[in-house]
Amino acid sequence: MHGTARFEDKVVLVTGATSGIGAALATAFVAEGARVVGCGRDQGRLMSLASRVDLALTLDVTSQGSVDMAAAAVQDRYGRVDIVVNNAGIGHFQAWQDTTIVDFQRIMDTNLYGAIRVAQALLPGMVAQGEGVLVNIASVAGERGYPKHTAYCASKHAMIGWSRALTKDLRGSGVAVVLVCPPAVDTPFFENAGFPDYKAHHPGLALMSPDAVAAGTLDAVAGRRTQVILSPRARALWLLDKLAPPLVEGLQRWKDAR
Ligand SMILES: NC(=O)c1ccc[n+]([C@@H]2O[C@H](COP(=O)([O-])OP(=O)(O)OC[C@H]3O[C@@H](n4cnc5c(N)ncnc54)[C@H](OP(=O)(O)O)[C@@H]3O)[C@@H](O)[C@H]2O)c1
């Protein structure tokens, strides 16, 4: 835990707080003094979350009605929200031929439009109060292409493009957008995406812990960082990708052929 309570009394809404990174984010914000509204769909996991946060709220980001109800509940209870974390997300890891338009729509509806729905509902309040932070949990898959990731990469690239444009629109409003790009993280995410043997397919890949993602995210929020790529390996690959794309492509092919 960080030595100071950097988020004392801040109202922080975290989507997808019932599992993985969102659960770790909720815990980390609570540990630093925040009043956390943890959201999700799974009622059993929401009940267990309720004892660890200020308020556990049902929220399905694919439903405009659900987003509006959650925003109204937060407004009623606190009269404000200081930090919104768009973390809810799903994966889909299939070859492009096996990825249908319906798969794309499902992924986009959660990962992109879900985040936009939440932001559109809560940003006006933050702009009116003249301060706030919108945190978008993207991915290194939003900066680079990966095999069998077409739908997921498309959703996270789009999230990054949306975030960058929104940053410009919000300039001078007191509201910042913080983009977080984690590498592969040790959560049920891959199992939920129909890829239970992810670890076996990537021997030697050290998965980041959800707690480490949460720590990096809180530092980024405290520092109002525009974008953080968590993990030195992912940062190095990102930089190489920009500077020497053929080299990275060659390395990737060599790895895929093994
Ligand atoms: N794990 C990784 O390797 C990794 C790497 C980079 C980025 N990320 C990103 O990190 C975020 C969290 O992933 P995770 O690894 O923590 O996965 P996870 O353990 O599967 O958790 C996903 C969370 O999203 C929620 N969720 C899914 N669909 C939702 C919907 N329609 N409405 C509201 N909530 C919904 C789930 O809650 P309910 O089921 O209760 O709704 C759950 O709390 C995602 O955006 C993911 O893309 C993950």
Image (cartoon, grey):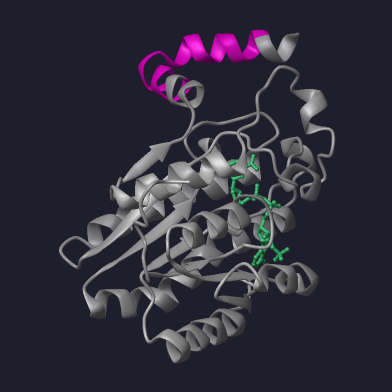
Q: Residue furthest bottom?
A: 76
Ligand 1 picture quarter: bottom right
Q: Main secondary structure of the magenta part?
A: helix
Residue at 54%, 75% in the rendered image: 54
219 to the left or right of 38: left
Name the quadrant containing residue 205.
top right
The quarter of the image holding the C terminus is top right
60 to the left or right of 177: right
Instruction: Compare residues 216 and 199 and report the one nearer the observer.
Output: 216
Vertical side of 221 occupied by 239: above or below: above
Vertical side of 51 occupied by 193: above or below: above
User: Which contiguous range is marked in magenta?
Assistant: 237-254
Instruction: Compare residues 152 and 17 and report the one nearer the observer.
Output: 17
Whole-percent x, y for residue 159 in the image: 47, 52
Whole-percent x, y for residue 113 in the image: 54, 64
Residue at 46%, 23% in the rendered image: 232
Query: In this figure, what is the number of numbered marks?
Result: 0
Asked if residue 158 lies in the magenta stretch, the reply is no
Instruction: Compare residues 119 and 27 and report the one nearer the observer.
Output: 27
Name the quadrant containing residue 176.
bottom left
Whole-percent x, y for residue 27 in the image: 56, 57
Residue at 36%, 42% in the rendered image: 227
Residue at 69%, 48% in the rendered image: 91
Q: Residue furthest left?
A: 172
Vertical side of 258 occupied by 99: above or below: below
Whole-percent x, y for residue 136 in the image: 45, 54
Asked if residue 240 lies in the magenta stretch, the reply is yes
Vertical side of 23 occupied by 248: above or below: above
